[in-house]
Amino acid sequence: MLGTILCLLLGVWIPGIQAATDFNKLRTLAEQRYGERAKNTIIELEVLLNSLRDAPDQEKLEKINLFVNDKIRRFDDDINIWGQSDYWATPLESLGREAGDCEDYSIAKYVFLRELGIPNEKLRLTYVRAKIGGPNSRISQAHMILSYYPTPNAEPLILDNLIISIRPASRRPDLVPIFSFNSEGLWTGTSTTPSSDSLSHLSRWRNVLARMQADGIE
């Protein structure tokens, strides 16, 4: 998975999501595609977002992290959920199926936090190598998390689906950052300076943005 993503980096800027959501459309599509339960989840989401509009960032992070981890109930491989080896689901798809892999959790959290007005420069979708079996293990796998930067050079907070509590990066020795991205650029490793490529071409990111817009998330 990670190798596939790295092969897609070609140096083309891609716009990010502003996350202004048409909840009427989202509710209708949720019910049509996935049924009453999915529609009720979207209603819960809208209520939650409205309650957090004026909340401090830390509360937004905690509540959104908890909501996504709770509502995407099953962590599974794309091949088992979508019949594809690597598929980035929209938040509607993940919440509707109640299943997803690491990218799906991270994308949903990113979208909902952007909806709450957290600036894009504070959020990065981050690919890591996750050590399996503890920090001293030599076994690792590709994984995606969402990183929150209070200031540009600050230690990030990690929003993850493997460990539910939000922790600073220094308390996640099991994660080794590879690269991260948002609509402003691409960062490699722990660098605080974006790549000179601005944002590289991630075809799956472009594709999921287009499908989110079709769902009602602009």
Image: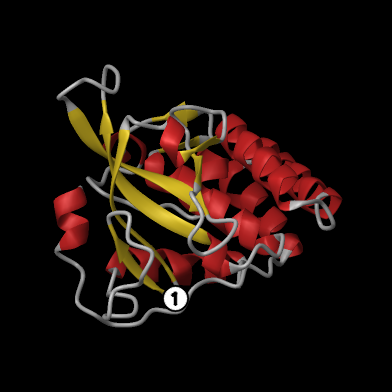
Q: Residue at x 78, y 51 (%)?
A: 56
The quarter of the rendered structure image containing the C terminus is: bottom right
- In the image, farthest residue toward the front: 153
Q: Looking at the picture, how far across and down is residue 52, in whole percent?
A: 80, 50
Quarter-wise, where is residue 26 in the image? bottom right
Towards the viewer: 38 or 213 = 213
Colouring rule applied to residues: secondary structure
Q: Looking at the picture, how far across and down is residue 111, in whole percent?
A: 58, 58
Q: Looking at the picture, how far across and down is residue 18, in whole percent?
A: 60, 73
Asked if one can make out residue 83 in the rendered structure from this viewpoint, the answer is yes
Q: In the displayed structure, does residue 115 sit left or right of residue 134?
A: right
Q: Residue at x 32, y 51 (%)?
A: 87
Q: In the figure, 189 relative to 19: above or below? A: above
Q: In the displayed structure, does residue 83 sit left or right of residue 88?
A: left
Towards the viewer: 83 or 210 = 210
Quarter-wise, where is residue 22 in the image? bottom right
Quarter-wise, where is residue 53 in the image? bottom right
Q: In the figure, 71 relative to 194: above or below? A: above
Circle 1 SS class: loop
Q: In the figure, 110 relative to 66: above or below? A: below
- In the image, farthest residue toward the top: 133
Q: Amino acid at mark 1?
A: Glu
Q: Residue at x 29, y 74 (%)?
A: 195
Q: Looking at the picture, how far across and down is residue 37, in whole percent?
A: 68, 35
Asked if one can make out residue 91 in the rendered structure from this viewpoint, the answer is no
Q: In the figure, 184 relative to 25: above or below? A: below
Q: Which residue is mark 1?
A: 184
Q: In the displayed structure, does residue 169 sit left or right of residue 178?
A: right
Towards the viewer: 99 or 178 = 178
Towards the viewer: 65 or 215 = 65
